[in-house]
Image (cartoon, rainbow, N blue to C red):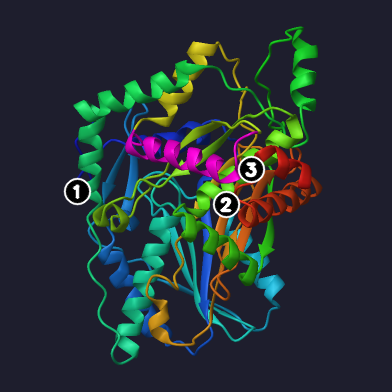
Amino acid sequence: MMKTRKGYTVYPLTVAQKFHRFYLDRCPKKQVVNIGTSLTIETEIDFEVLKQSIYKAYERCEAMRIRFAQDKDGTWYQYIIDKEERDIEFVDFSEKTMEEAEAIMKGWTEVPFSRWDSPQNRIVMIKTSDGYSGIYLLVDHFTMDAQSLICFLKDIIELYCNQMYENVPYPKEMASYIEQLKKDLAYEAGCKAKERDIAFFEKLIESSEPVYAGIDGTKMLDEEKERTGNPNARTVINVSDSVDSALDVFHLEGEPTKRLMDFCEEHHVSLACLLIMGLHTYFHKMNNYNDVSINTAIARRATLKEKKSGGTRIHSFPFRTIITEDKTFLDGIYQIRDLQNKMFRHANYDPVAYFAYRGKIYHNQPGHTYEPMSLTYQPLTLKQNGLEKLGNIKYKTKWYANGATTQAMYLTVMHRPNDNGLDFNFEHQIKAVSREQLEFLYYYLCKIMFKGAENPNLTVGDIMKLV
């Protein structure tokens, strides 16, 4: 058993990291765990000051200094180096079109990191032809998730602005990744909370078996029943034989987004609840049954230390709802909120253990699933988190596809910085789900959410008839 590496203490992987490894091991394209993004600002940047701010941000964030090692029996370990001294690259895209620049950055996002004893991120300072300058950041999902990535970018910007502008305070310290890691590993070793979490999820799984609801209706499930000769089949294989992916983005403007946010505020629910209710109603309408299960991500960042410790903390679980047609739209949302709150309390449970236990209980075939898609809602924006101090300086963020996914369809909903509208980012296997199918889903999802927000006391059945 490895204890140290290059003089540093080594630690096992966390459950969240093991979940990434679960699908990485099954994916031929190892860039599947890459997250690429850029943040650019419409102002002249002093790149030397920016470079020093990046070094300082590395110093303040242990998770950005993670390295991985593997012992002789194949066990993975992680350790944190003291200092990041790589040169920070600079690329001037001024002479290239925005399309050319974005194609190059997408290319960077498709290059997997060397796994062992190597940096698991890359930062490039960039200047683009639209008059914006800033940072391209590529990280490995084993070391960061979207929330910690945004937190790190925010830290760079605030460090830079503290140097460049008067009255911008020095940002508060980040939290320790190692300290949080030790807490997670102590939980995994066994405790009363873990026992309660296991009991909660095993009871939830045992309550009854879910059923697959397709984006186009019951076609895939009907084909599975015919293929197997089993009229009671409830799972399908919904992925293709290729992990090649595309990222299709649909934009909801600022004003209609505000109407949805106002509805959520008025009824004390999150936008995630409204999105899940919208998706449930869509799949209910398309499949003509009210039992719908989709995968949802839980950030596990309830405390300030968890929010600022970096690393990857997302656990992803199936979220199953059975909402009858006679329930009002608002009652459906409250049902979702209540289940969400219960799951949040037990979200340290191991997602890999969840799928293994469910597979054992219902004798699932390998590769079969009940869930047609995954959903993540990302409420954080840089504007909420410090950039408003810069007055009216405009900025842009962009996410780049890594070209591979092991899921048929993954929807990430995020707020745009310029107008706080919503971007619906559909990453999907090209051979499994088409852009036309996504356009259809997006169109009806929006119709359902707006109709429900305008008429929250209408029944689900009535809303399905109206859309």
Q: Is residue 428 visible?
A: yes
Q: Residue at x 51, y 32 (%)?
A: 318
Region of the chain picked out in magenta, as a range: 326-348
Disc nearest the viewer among 2 and 1: 2
Camera-nearest residue between 283 and 134:
283
Q: Earlier in the sequence, mark 3 or mark 1?
A: 1
Percent position of residue 70, x then y: 34, 35
Residue 279 is tagged as 3
Residue for badge 1? 179
Q: What separation in Å lies between label 3 and label 1 (alpha carbons)?
A: 38 Å
Select label 2 or label 3 by which is in front.
Answer: 3
Give the quarter of the image for residue 182: top left
Residue type marked 3 = Leu
Q: Which residue is mark 2?
A: 412
Gap between marks 2 and 3 measured at Cα: 13 Å
Given this view, does label 3 or label 1 mark the residue nearer the observer? 3
Neighbours of disc 1 within 10 Å: few (<14), some (14-19), many (20+):
few
Q: Amino acid at mark 2?
A: Thr
